[in-house]
Image (cartoon, helix red, strand yellow):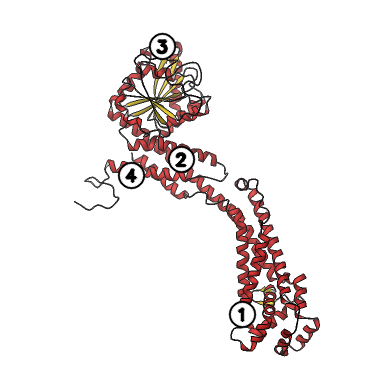
Amino acid sequence: MPNETPGARPQDAAGQQTPAARQAAAVDLLEAVRHELAAVTLPLALPGADTARQDIRQALAQLDDYILPRYRSLDAPLLAVVGGSTGAGKSTLVNGLVGHPVTRAGAIRPTTRQPILLHHPVDAEWFEDQRVLPSLSRIRGTVVADPLPAHQAGPTPDAAAITSLVLAADPAVPQGIALLDAPDVDSISDDNRRLAGQLLAAADLWIFVTTANRYADAVPWRLLLDAASRDIMVAVVLDRVPPAAEEEVSTDLRAMLTREGLGSARLFVVPEVPLDAMGMLPADAVAPLQGWLRTLAADAAGRAAIARRTLNGTVKALSGRVEAVAGAVSAQHHAAGLLAKDATGAYDDAVARILDATRDGALLRGEVLARWQDFVGTGEFFRVMEQNIGRLRDRMGAFFRGEPAPAVRVEAAIETGLQAVILDEAANAAEDADQRWRSDPAGRQLLGTDDLSGTSDGFADAIAAEIRAWQGGLMELIRTEGQGKRTQARWLSFGINGLGAALMIVVFSMTAGLTGLEIGVAGGTAVVGQRVLEAVFGEDAVRRLAKTARDDLQARCQRLLQAEQRRFLDRLDDPDPVPPTALTAHAAALGRLAAAA
């Protein structure tokens, strides 16, 4: 026995896939398409999104109700759905086709509420399970020997939405074709209209019933044009036609069908004739249509050809729908990307402004400057240090052994000033992002009535905690750098907070990378911090410490504002888990499937 590749489809002697293998491959493709369409949500309020959602609902329903069942059971009986306008005489026509009343007919509208599927008893197995129309439960009906008059026949459902399908086995229905009496396509009931569309989408064959004075109505023609796009076989029944008008009306209708791509549709004319006491048409009035259906039923090859023609046309139409959905998903991804860019851009700009404020000397004004000057001493101290900078190292010990104002006051002032800058810029970013989103319909929908134009609750406390953590990190940097420097051990022991404050001052006065000080801003006081640090650690070490401290501050600011921007980005989530490229590929595969058949 030859080896087979796992998962490979069986092939014939010529190396081609067998019909069964092709059928199985088609079912696999259709199931994959169904799975991915069901995962599409289109959450953003974009133009065309409602239409795309409707396309998805209709595509899923047609896959479940018709395409997948038919591909899985290519030899199943044809399902002929009898549909049409209100009062067109559908139920009366169905009764005439089987020769006795089985469906409800009358003057009260809507008449047909619960769909009735008539089939030959031998074909019962094809319809009793959920193979077709799986969303409708089954109710087994019975055709009695002494039927009720037409106006009393059939079930009388309540006004609730229809959730079931009545099955009735009748030997008068030819084996190989089932008849389904559908509600009016233009019913006053929304549920009836939706159900009619669902049933017609599940048909192999349409028997479309209209009248001499309603055949040009818009609603039926929309469905007929849909039939043309699916290449479905359609039989049009022109009902209740006065004999004198038959030629004129039928000629006009035939011309309309031809113009709209339905020139191959069979046209049957039922003359306007009185009904008998049971509400039945004369047998000869429906004989042409009845004979045509029996001929189709007797021709197995012809039935298969009709089923495949409708199936291929439906798959081709599905390909177009999936392609349209792919476009809608792509638009969602693009719109979500723009909204995300608006939010992240607003907060990235805020981070940049915060960093600018921490390096141009702006934070060395006001309270920070005052506390630093209190800490390092009077103006006389600076004059002495400037006059004899060479003796700085000798003076450092005395300076730190003295009792200047506590360095923690400098830290507290820095914390307060830096917190105010971050809080202000975060509020500006929130307002900017909120305005950008509200200028976009999709953004407005995502925000709804929520106001995100300010900072979140507790954000000020989060900033303070992050600044204190940054300051603590600076102290640890200084401790680590001072290890092994025995000559500075005493300075580090008594002046760790002072050295930390000096490092913060250096960080906040940098204007050009790691060099240069905004001397004018603080009247020269920032020089002290740099001189102190260089005296203890050396110039290179000060550069390294300052860079590490600045990088840490930048990372903490970014984390703070990224947490804030999540308020916007979390509303986006993933617009759709299915990439548009996957749907486009499926649409192309469906097109090839239809073309190959």
Residue on which disc 1 sits: 479
Q: Residue 458, relative to residue 93: is it above or below?
A: below
Residue 114: quadrant of the picture: top left
Question: Tag 4, which secondary structure?
Answer: helix
Q: Residue 343, relative to residue 365: is it above or below?
A: above
Q: Earlier in the sequence, mark 1 or mark 4?
A: 4
Spatial distance from mark 2 to mark 3, Cα to Cα?
46 Å
Residue on which disc 3 sits: 278
Which amino acid does the dot numbered 1 rest on? Arg
Question: Tag 1, which secondary structure?
Answer: helix
Label at residue 321: 2
In this view, the residue in front, 268 or 524, is 524
Mark 1 vs mark 4, foreground winner is: 1
Q: Earlier in the sequence, mark 3 or mark 4?
A: 4
Spatial distance from mark 1 to mark 4, Cα to Cα?
69 Å
Residue on which disc 4 sits: 25
Q: Earlier in the sequence, mark 2 or mark 4?
A: 4
Quadrant (top left/top right/bottom left/bottom right) for the C terminus? top left
Question: Tag 3, which secondary structure?
Answer: loop
Which amino acid does the dot numbered 2 rest on? Arg
Which amino acid does the dot numbered 4 rest on? Ala
Mark 2 vs mark 3, foreground winner is: 3
